[in-house]
Amino acid sequence: MAQLRQDYDKFVGKESVILVVGPDKQADFQEYWSKHELPFIGLPDPEHHVADLYGQQVKLLRAGRMPAIMLIDKSGRIRLQHYADSMRDIPPNQSILDILDILNQEGYDGAADIAE
Amino acid sequence: MSTTILQAAPNFTLNDLQGQPVSLSDYRFKKNVVLVFNRGFF
């Protein structure tokens, strides 16, 4: 989390938002957020709705394979997933930023090619 | 382990720390989303 925070402005500059989903309750999120002054959007999910959704529908997020990081482009497609043993094990920010550059250069032409 | 893929991301809605609903689809055509699944803080 600290690693992502370090380059937060660069992520914002690349037309991106950072959403953090976790099993902690809202009060625990708030405590952690204020302690570490995190600028990300925190999304408490104590009942694992989103983790289950991604695990069942997309077969991406398997139990025990957290933390994980995914890049979703503006057209709503997952472009990269990464499983880690800890938040220290996520890809270097520069790798993620480089991929965001590629996604931004691609542009997009609407939702026509996305299966709903 | 990183994988490059191309798959529609399922939409979801959760409340943020201010209690406001946030949906993945809010960012469609506006922002790239870095979605982090955290394991828990404590």
Image (cartoon, rainbow, N blue to C red):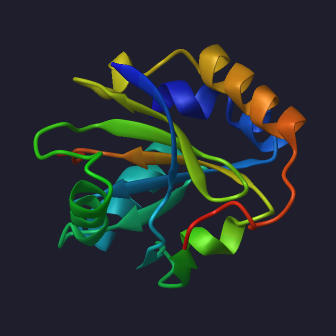
Horizontal and vertical percent position of residue A11: 73, 37
Q: Tell whether A106 sits left or right of A111.
A: right
Residue nearer the viewer, A21 or A65: A65
Residue displayed at 62% across by 26% down: A6
Q: Quadrant of residue A45?
A: bottom left
Instruction: Pick out the residue farthest to the bottom.
Output: B20
Residue nearer the viewer, A109 or A31: A109
Horizontal and vertical percent position of residue A29: 35, 60
State which quarter of the image contains the C terminus of chain A: bottom right
Does residue A38 show up? Answer: no
State which quarter of the image contains the N terminus of chain A: top left
Horizontal and vertical percent position of residue A17: 67, 52
Residue displayed at 25% across by 50% down: A59
Instruction: Pick out the residue farthest to the left.
Output: A64
Horizontal and vertical percent position of residue A70: 47, 41
Q: Tell whether B4 sits left or right of B2.
A: right
Q: Tell whether B11 sits left or right of A114.
A: left
Q: Is residue A53 above or below residue A82?
A: below
Q: Quadrant of residue A99?
A: top right
Does residue A70 show up? Answer: yes
Residue displayed at 74% across by 67% down: A111
How many numbered markers are drawn? 0
Residue nearer the viewer, B42 or A63: A63
Q: Quadrant of residue A48?
A: bottom left
Q: Is residue A56 above or below residue A82?
A: below
Residue nearer the viewer, A105 or A112: A112
Q: Is residue A77 above or below residue A115?
A: above
